[in-house]
Amino acid sequence: MVMATLEVECPVCSEVLELTEDDRQELQVGDVIVCDSCNAEMEVTRNGGGEDFELELLGVLTTCPNCGEEFEVTEDLVASAPTVRGADGVEVSIVPCPHCKAQIELEFVTEPSGAV
Ligand SMILES: [Zn+2]
Ligand SMILES: [Zn+2]
């Protein structure tokens, strides 16, 4: 058996998360991994050997710039959120803070579907 490090790309910020063989042995389906870079939460949905590993994006923990409370932005929330395109062409989603109801602009890197 070769000790392999699996590289998983964060679906939100594209940061590469490295999972060693040891890490993966401790992970079970249903466990949650948090991206160091953007705080996205991903649930392990498959963890077999080798390349047999899958994650499902749960949400991203965001700190509200208005009230300072953390809240989780899920894919569903983003899907139902209105988007606006800024002057520089970057699309941002407007999600409401559950604490203070402020409208928070979130920038997501949406990759063209089907491309990896
Ligand atoms: Zn990330
Ligand atoms: Zn808030």
Image (spheres, grey):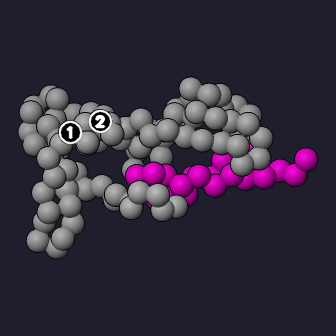
Whether 103 is drawn above or below 5: the answer is: above
**4 left or right of 91?**
right
The disc label shown at residue 6, or none: none
x and y, in percent, of residue 2 in the image: 87, 52
Residue in view at x 73 percent, y 53 percent: 5
x and y, in percent, of residue 88 in the image: 16, 73
User: Which amino acid type is marked by label 1?
Assistant: Ser
Residue interval drawn in magenta = 1-21
The disc label shown at residue 80, or none: 1
Q: Mark 2 points at which residue?
A: 76
**41 left or right of 27?**
left
- Can residue 68 be seen in this snapshot? no
User: Which amino acid type is marked by label 2?
Assistant: Asp
Whether 107 is drawn above or below 66: the answer is: below
Find residue 80 and report its image quarter: top left
Residue in view at x 64 percent, y 35 percent: 46
**13 left or right of 20?**
left
